[in-house]
Image (cartoon, rainbow, N blue to C red):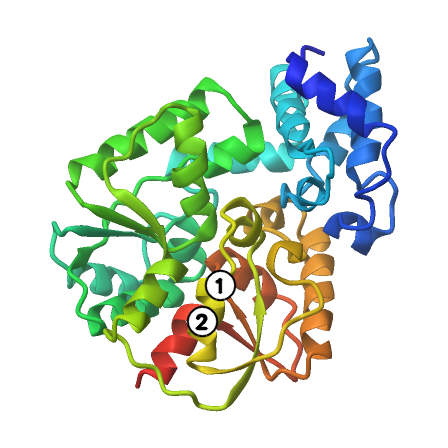
Amino acid sequence: MSMVAKEEKIINACRFCWMCRHVCPVGKVTGLERNNARARALALSLVTRGQSLTADIVDNIYECVLCGACTKDCVTGFDPTRFVKAARLEAALEGLTPESVVRILDDLEQYSNPYAGTVLAPALQEAIASLPQQAPILFYLGSSARYQNPQAAVTAIRLMKKAGVNFTVMMDEPDSGLYKANLLGSVAETRESMVQTAEMINKTKAEILVAFGPSCAKAFLRDYPEYNILLSPQVRTFTSWLNTLIQDGALVPTNRQNVITFHDPCTLARDLEEEDPAREILAACGTLKEMFLHGKHTMCCGSGLMDLYAPALTAKMSSSRWNSAQETGAQTLVTACPSCYTVFAKTQPDRMRLCGIESIVWEACK
């Protein structure tokens, strides 16, 4: 197995360390030792020393949700997700990528999204068609919102229009490249996809790029620079942009006495280190009651991408997060991620309401 020195160093550091075993959201719901950074590192350390990479080891590598909880908790600053991505690349080179993941990659190649989506929902098509073809602000929806949660995209567009924002949305929006990066790691195809997307975005001549999904924002703000890919517009997360609209008085929500708890998307809170804007938004819409693990300590609910190839695992993770939400006594769980919303909706308990942050603000501004 050919790992670069950086990944091998992390593997050798993690293989005998137990310190992050208690924070892995996958390990917590499965109760299995294999589902933590140490176990993965121990298996991969054997592979780097000559043992064959087996299908079982690869399956375990794809049970990592790449949420970064282990990284956040590492006092020595190591990032186990680096060797997870490197191992996924090695599995692809050896033809060991699980069939369920191969199908997603095939859909990405054919449809430019992992959901095999070809036609947008009529309401979303109508909402996009109502916008100018060119504007100083480009609103990037992302595949999850476009094909899995189109109503959230429609509501977000209506909210931006209500605020008087001069913006546009691409009808044929390109994939950010995020999915390939997570499933395959650093391969030429990943960078090529990102380059094509950057070119399409830059051609719009937009000055600001607002990314609806935190994962898309992370791709634009973190991954693109790592690949030396230049985006012309300034990149903003939707939550920081929405908070600015409220602070500037473009949107005036009314506190409706909602009792809310907020699920921090791990990409937003940990990768992008953004915690406050969503809380300031929700404070204007109701009363916020925090879950025990929140902010940078948030517990991943299971990614929409993993849900495509390991739905039983993501169901356990989202159910666990719902339990934490119910313990707060809140009536409504709000998330700022269309992908998280899709996962939560599949395990939503009868006694609680699920809401995207765009929807809770839309209601408060009526």
Residue 29 image-quadrant placement: bottom right
Q: Is residue 108 above or below residue 158?
A: above
Q: Amino acid at mark 1?
A: Asp
Say whether residue 138 is visible: yes
Say which residue appears at 17% left-offset and 69% top-offset: 164
Residue 276's disc number: 1
Query: In the shown orientation, is residue 328 left or right of residue 145?
Result: right
Query: Callout 2, which amino acid?
Result: Glu
Please name the residue shown 34% across and 82% down the image.
Answer: 253
Return the x and y of residue 242 as percentages of the image width and height: 34, 65
> Which quarter of the figure has residue 298?
bottom right
In the structure shown, which secondary structural element does the residue marked by tag 1 occupy?
helix
Where does label 2 land, which residue?
Answer: 280
**Quadrant including the C terminus:** bottom left
Q: Nearer the viewer, residue 281 or 48?
A: 281
Q: Quadrant of residue 346?
A: bottom right
In the rendered view, tell whether residue 58 sits above or below residue 266.
above
Give me the residue at 83% from left, 25% from top: 43
> Dot 2: few (<14), some (14–19), or many (≥20) neighbours within 10 Å?
some
- Percent across and percent down for residue 359 are 40, 74
Percent of width and height locating residue 262: 57, 70
Image quadrant in which the N terminus is located:
top right
Between 355 and 17, the one nearer to me in the picture: 17
Disc 1 and disc 2 in contact, CB within 8 angstroms: yes
